[in-house]
Structures are given as structure tokens and as C-alpha cells.
Image (cartoon, coloured by chain):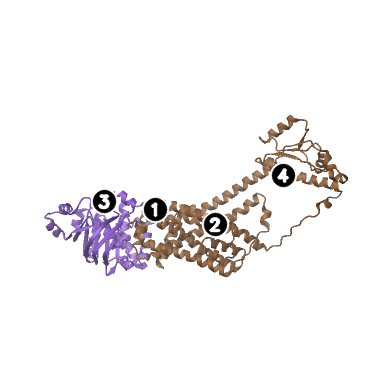
């Protein structure tokens, strides 16, 4: 144990005594995350405000009388009426869709008024008239104008239906009213469960990758690992010392990211006017949930850190280690993505698969669907794989081929 | 004491290494059936050209490499069966093994002291003694990367001796040092001998070997070609200085393109 203790304290002081390291690992991420999120919020808000403030440029061809009176009653104004005889004006307006000098053209057919005004007596002769929309979906103003006028037309349609049948309610037949009956904690847990395992995977890997490569492959390259190999400390103590110190640093750097996101995310959502989405959101964890998460989390961190250390041990130098670690990182990210969109459905053996199983278990813990056998299965499997990697690394530390390229 | 019996070390070369060495042989015999003994209270010199197998031999003693054949016993402990016990009794220094550049000499001295389980009061006493002998005491809180070459080497020597080992193995300890620093290192080795320690040094500097070593072992192409005191080696070769004697041994024993 004395060896592990001495090595952990050395590795930690390597990071914490170095101002640049502290800056890049713990302070820069906060500034970056909060900065990026605020910037994003400001830009999105600016864009939304801009679109909303914009007065849409709309042309209506062949405007029927009923629409005119509807628009007057509803206070809709700001569109230009064109006659269907005026081909030139129509072409100019249509060309304007390309350069955003026009946002929307709405064309009513000639017989529109006649068709919509036909009463119940001649019901067999009724055909559906077609209103043509011309808009440019790659222009925000144009899309927005279309959405606005579509909603006007909906109301207009209801008015016409009311006219034809005397009572709109008779036509609508029925409406649906949603009543949400759900366990709030479970709902929020489900949402968190989709994102959290993926984020944790990404953050722990990202935080530990550079440090782990330097801590092992870097020391090997600089010849400082050999100095440690000359001490009477057993190799497994050196391996464990490295794994533990890297785990501590990985958790700290992931925590920094998560805390800064927790600060920045509500700011972002508030900025873009979605604060309603946050109002009902809260989650309460039970003691068992917290205990399960901590136990599993430690195992997951040890496993990920061991994977990184393993790659660094077998690489001959930092360059090699960095190039080996990138595909591993991508694989882990892909595995994380898969877990976002799949579910283990409580099938026991799926919880035994490393990385995947623990992510699934995280989801289930958050939604309170985990069973004890599944939890134990995934925990034991995660710790077991970490132990296997540590044993392999210890073997590698004893190998002169791996340590000295001999 | 150290007993080496029929030590042989063969490296298996990868195809890349074979290309680099321009050989088609996938085996490289670095040390070929070497046997010798070294006792406490003597300075034993390993003499040989670059690539002769000196460093490999020393690394086998230090448990960093495992012999392909033969045995190495240090203070009664076999290097393969009880590597931790062997490492506890030796202090080892070589050029390729370095101190962490980001830490101060004092931090590393204490760190390795802890790995060797030196008690805190003893550790403090050792640090004061060694740092003042090698003149590191003014620089002990500077990072290794900020030290001069000579100061780095002296710090490395101090760290390798933190646990007051009975056996000291130094691989070319004066290489890259100026005369004054080199002299303080060789003087310290003589002092260690006086205290009854066993010192093994490898060198290719003849004058150093002449002045320092009680006995010499000449290694050429992985084979032991001579062993004995300076006088024994002069007698064997019929020369009156080490440089001529060494050339004579090299001429007789070295075969081109083995």
C-alpha cells in the first residue's frame, strides 16, 4: 500500500503544482463551457428575435372577399394584393423569393369564393379548391411567414366551415384534451438516463486520455518510469497507483464539466425563452439510487481509466499512444451513442457486457427500473473487467519487451 | 556480493529492428555466457566498447532484464525469483533512466525514499548528507528540468543512493560531466568502497578505470575476454598501460561481422 500511496500523491501533485495543468484541466473548461453556452444562447436569441421582429412580405393573388373580411376582422394586415391578370407583378414577386425580397406568395383559384360559399343544398357539386403557396424553405423569414399564414388559413377554414354548416362544433365532431399522468421523477430520470451515460463516458474519457497517455507512455519515453521500476515496490502497486490517481483526476475533470454545464444550461434555455420547459423539472433520488450510482460509477471510472492506461502501457511512446487511443475513444463514443437509443429490457446477459451494460444499468437506476440481479451483474462485470486489465498491465510492467522495447 | 553464472542474454529482434541493424538474423546475442563474482569492499570495473554488453549485464543484475540463460544472485537473492529483494539492496544508475523533469530534487529524493520505505528521520538525514556532499543543497527546490547537466546527474546519483544500498551499480556515471563534477563522483565511489560497499561501474574511459577500479572485467562482443587487477591485465597482454592492453584484447577477440 505504501507504494500506491506515494505514487498517487506524486501524480496528483504533478497536476496540482503545475499552474498550467490546473488552468487547462479545471479552470479553462468552466470558462469554455459557460462561454460557449452563453454565446450560443445569445446568438440563438438574436436570431429568434430577428425573425419575430421581421414584418413578412406577403403577396396574395386573387384575394377572395371572404378572406378580406376575415383578415380585417382578425386584424391581419401588411400583405399586398395582386390581381391574377398582372402577370409581371407576380413574376417579380416570385423572383423575389430567391433574394428574400418576398417571403410568401399565396394564390387563390378563380372559383374559390364560389366553391367555399356553396351551401349544403348542392353538396354533391362541391369540389375542394386549392390554394397555392410559394415560399423558400431555406430562408428563415420565408418559412416563418408560411407558418404564420398557415395558421391564419386554419382559422379562416374554421370560419368557412361554420358558415357552411351553421355550427363549427358540428363539423369538428370531437377534440382531444391531453391529461398528463406520470411520475415526474421517472420522467426526468428517463430523460437524464438517455443523456447521462453518454456524457459520463465522453467526459471521463476526454479528461483521462491526455493525462493517462503522459502518465504512462510519457514516463516510459522520458525514462522516468524505469527509475520507478528500480525501486523494490511491486509492479501491481505501480499500476494501481497510476490507475487510482488517473481515476481521481478523471472524476474531478468530469465533475468540473458537469458543474459548469449545470450552471450554463439553464442560462442557455432561459436565453432562448424556453424557461417553461425547466419549471416543472426536478428530480429526487432515493438513498438506494444514489448508493447504486456511486458504486457503479466508481467501477465505470476504473474500467475506462484502465482501458486508457492499457493502451498507454503497450504503446512505445506518446505519439504511438495518442494514435492508438483515438480509435478507442471513437469506439467508446459509438458504444455510448448506441446506449442512447437502445434498451436492455431487463435481459440479464446484456448487463454483463462492459461499457454497454453499465450504461444500461445507469438508465435503469435513473428510471427506477433496475433489478438487484441486473445491478449486481453489471457491477461485478464492470469491476471484473477493470481487474483483468490491471492484471494484464501488471504482466506488461514485468515484461522487458513492453517496458524497455528489449 | 554478486555472483553471476553463465549469464546469457539474447534479444529477439523485430523485423523493423533487423532492418535497422542490417541483419537477417532475428536473434542478437548481447551477453554471451559471462560468469564473475564481486565482493563487498571492492570497486569492479566493466570495460568495453559501445554495444559490448556492459549495460545489458548491469540491467540483468538490476532485475530490469531477465537472463535468457544462467543466473544472477545478489546478496543471496536470485534476480528472477526475488526481484524486489534484489532491488531493495542495490542502487542503480544509468543514462537512460532519468528523473522526472517537473519535480524538484528534494521531492524526488523523498518520493523514492518512501518507495524504499526509508523512515522519515533517516530520510532527512540521508538527504542532508548526500545533498551537501554533491552540492545540491542550494538547488534542491528547483525543478530537475531547470538544473544543469552536471547537477542533474548529481541529483540522479543522490536519488539512487537514498536507501543507503550495500551494492552500488553505476553505468558510465561520469559520461557528459566536466572534470570537476566527474572527480566528485569518483571520489564518492571511493568513499563508498571505504564504507565496505560493493561498487560496480561500467566505463570506456581508461584513465578512470585505472584510477578507480580494484578489478576489471573486459567485455568484447558480449564475451568476457579478461578479468583481474590492472597488473593481471598488463601481464596477460604484455602492455604497460590500460589503453594499449585494451586495444590488444580488442584486436585478438573482436571478429568483424559475427
Considering the numbered disc 1 on the image, is that residue within a helix, a strand or a loop? loop
Label 4: state its secondary structure: helix
Outermost residue toward the front? A124
Q: Residue A336, labelled with which disc?
A: 2
Residue position for label 3: B178
Residue A147's disc number: 4
Identify which residue, A85 or A213, lies in the foreground.
A85
Q: Chain of mark 3?
A: B
For the colour purple, the matching chain is B
- Give the foreground label among 1 and 3: 1
Name the residue: 48% across, 66% down: A384
- Say which element carries label 3: loop
Q: Residues within 10 Å of mark 3 (few under 14, many from 20)?
A: few
Alpha carbon distance from label 4 to label 1 = 58 Å
Which chain is disc 1 placed on? A
- For marks 2 and 1, the one nearer the N-term is 1
- Does label 4 lie on the same chain as label 3? no
Co-location on one chain, circles 3 and 2: no
Q: Quadrant of residue B153?
A: bottom left
Disc marking residue A72: none
Chain assigned brown: A
Cα distance, mark 3 to mark 4?
84 Å
Q: Which mark is drawn over residue A317?
A: 1
Image quadrant for the C terminus of chain A?
Answer: bottom left
Amino acid at each position: 500500500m505504501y507504494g500506491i500511496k506515494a505514487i498517487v500523491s506524486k501524480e496528483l501533485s504533478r497536476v496540482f503544482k503545475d499552474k498550467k495543468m490546473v488552468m487547462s484541466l479545471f479552470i479553462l473548461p468552466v470558462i469554455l463551457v459557460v462561454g460557449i453556452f452563453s454565446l450560443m444562447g445569445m446568438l440563438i436569441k438574436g436570431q429568434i428575435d430577428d425573425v419575430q421582429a421581421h414584418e413578412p412580405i406577403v403577396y396574395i393573388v386573387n384575394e377572395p372577399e371572404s378572406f378580406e373580411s376575415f383578415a380585417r376582422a382578425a386584424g391581419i394586415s401588411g400583405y399586398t394584393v395582386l390581381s391574377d391578370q398582372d402577370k409581371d407583378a407576380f413574376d417579380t414577386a416570385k423572383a423575389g423569393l430567391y433574394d428574400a425580397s418576398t417571403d410568401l406568395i399565396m394564390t387563390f383559384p378563380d372559383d374559390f369564393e364560389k366553391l367555399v360559399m356553396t351551401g349544403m343544398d348542392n353538396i354533391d357539386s362541391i369540389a375542394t379548391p386549392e390554394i397555392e403557396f410559394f415560399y423558400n424553405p431555406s430562408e428563415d423569414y420565408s418559412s416563418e411567414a408560411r407558418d404564420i399564414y398557415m395558421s391564419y388559413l386554419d382559422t379562416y377554414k374554421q370560419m368557412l366551415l361554420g358558415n357552411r354548416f351553421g355550427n363549427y362544433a358540428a363539423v369538428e365532431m370531437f377534440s382531444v384534451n391531453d391529461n398528463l399522468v406520470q411520475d415526474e421523477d421517472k420522467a426526468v430520470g428517463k430523460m437524464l438516463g438517455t443523456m447521462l451515460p453518454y456524457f459520463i463516458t465522453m467526459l471521463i474519457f476526454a479528461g483521462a486520455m491526455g493525462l493517462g497517455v503522459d502518465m504512462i507512455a510519457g514516463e516510459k519515453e522520458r525514462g522516468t518510469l524505469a527509475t520507478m521500476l528500480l525501486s523494490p515496490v511491486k509492479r501491481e502497486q505501480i499500476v494501481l497507483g497510476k490507475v487510482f490517481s488517473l481515476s481521481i483526476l478523471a472524476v474531478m475533470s468530469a465533475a468540473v464539466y458537469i458543474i459548469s454545464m449545470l450552471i450554463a444550461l439553464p442560462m442557455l434555455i432561459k436565453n432562448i425563452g424556453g424557461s417553461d420547459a425547466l419549471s416543472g423539472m426536478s428530480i429526487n433520488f432515493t438513498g438506494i439510487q444514489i448508493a447504486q450510482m456511486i458504486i457503479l460509477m466508481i467501477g465505470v471510472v476504473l474500467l475506462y481509466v484502465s482501458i486508457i492506461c492499457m493502451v498507454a502501457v503497450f504503446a512505445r511512446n506518446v505519439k504511438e499512444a495518442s494514435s492508438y487511443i483515438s480509435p478507442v475513444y471513437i469506439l467508446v463514443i459509438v458504444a455510448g451513442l448506441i446506449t442512447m437509443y437502445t434498451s436492455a429490457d431487463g435481459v440479464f446477459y446484456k448487463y454483463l457486457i462492459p461499457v454497454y451494460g453499465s450504461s444500461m444499468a445507469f438508465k435503469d437506476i435513473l428510471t427506477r427500473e433496475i433489478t438487484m440481479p441486473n445491478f449486481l451483474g453489471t457491477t461485478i462485470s464492470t469491476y471484473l473487467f477493470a481487474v483483468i486489465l490491471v492484471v494484464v498491465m501488471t504482466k506488461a510492467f514485468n515484461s522487458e519487451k513492453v517496458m524497455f522495447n528489449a | 556480493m554478486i555472483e553471476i553464472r553463465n549469464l546469457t542474454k539474447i534479444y529477439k529482434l523485430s523485423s523493423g529492428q533487423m532492418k535497422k541493424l542490417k541483419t537477417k538474423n532475428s536473434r542478437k546475442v548481447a551477453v554471451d555466457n559471462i560468469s564473475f563474482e564481486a565482493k563487498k569492499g571492492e570497486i569492479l570495473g566493466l570495460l568495453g566498447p559501445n554495444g559490448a554488453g556492459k549495460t545489458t549485464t548491469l540491467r540483468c543484475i538490476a532485475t530490469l532484464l531477465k537472463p535468457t540463460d544462467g543466473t544472477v544472485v545478489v546478496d543471496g537473492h536470485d534476480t528472477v525469483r526475488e526481484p524486489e529483494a534484489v532491488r531493495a539492496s542495490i542502487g542503480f544508475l544509468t543514462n537512460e533512466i532519468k528523473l522526472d523533469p517537473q519535480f524538484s530534487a528534494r521531492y524526488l529524493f523523498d518520493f523514492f525514499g518512501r518507495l524504499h520505505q526509508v523512515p522519515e528521520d533517516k530520510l532527512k538525514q540521508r538527504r542532508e548528507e548526500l545533498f551537501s556532499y554533491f552540492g545540491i543543497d542550494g538547488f534542491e527546490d528547483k525543478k530537475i528540468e531547470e538544473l544543469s547537466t552536471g547537477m542533474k546527474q548529481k541529483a540522479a546519483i543522490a536519488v539512487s543512493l537514498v536507501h543507503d544500498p550495500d551494492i552500488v551499480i553505476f553505468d558510465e556515471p561520469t559520461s557528459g560531466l566536466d572534470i570537476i563534477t566527474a572527480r566528485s563522483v569518483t571520489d564518492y565511489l571511493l568513499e563508498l568502497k571505504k564504507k565496505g560497499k560493493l561498487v560496480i561501474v561500467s566505463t570506456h574511459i581508461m584513465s578512470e578505470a585505472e584510477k578507480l577500479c580494484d578489478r576489471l572485467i573486459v567485455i568484447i562482443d558480449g564475451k568476457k575476454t579478461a578479468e583481474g587487477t590492472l597488473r593481471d591485465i598488463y601481464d596477460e597482454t604484455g602492455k604497460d598501460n590500460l589503453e594499449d592492453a585494451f586495444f590488444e584484447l580488442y584486436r585478438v577477440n573482436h571478429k568483424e561481422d559475427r
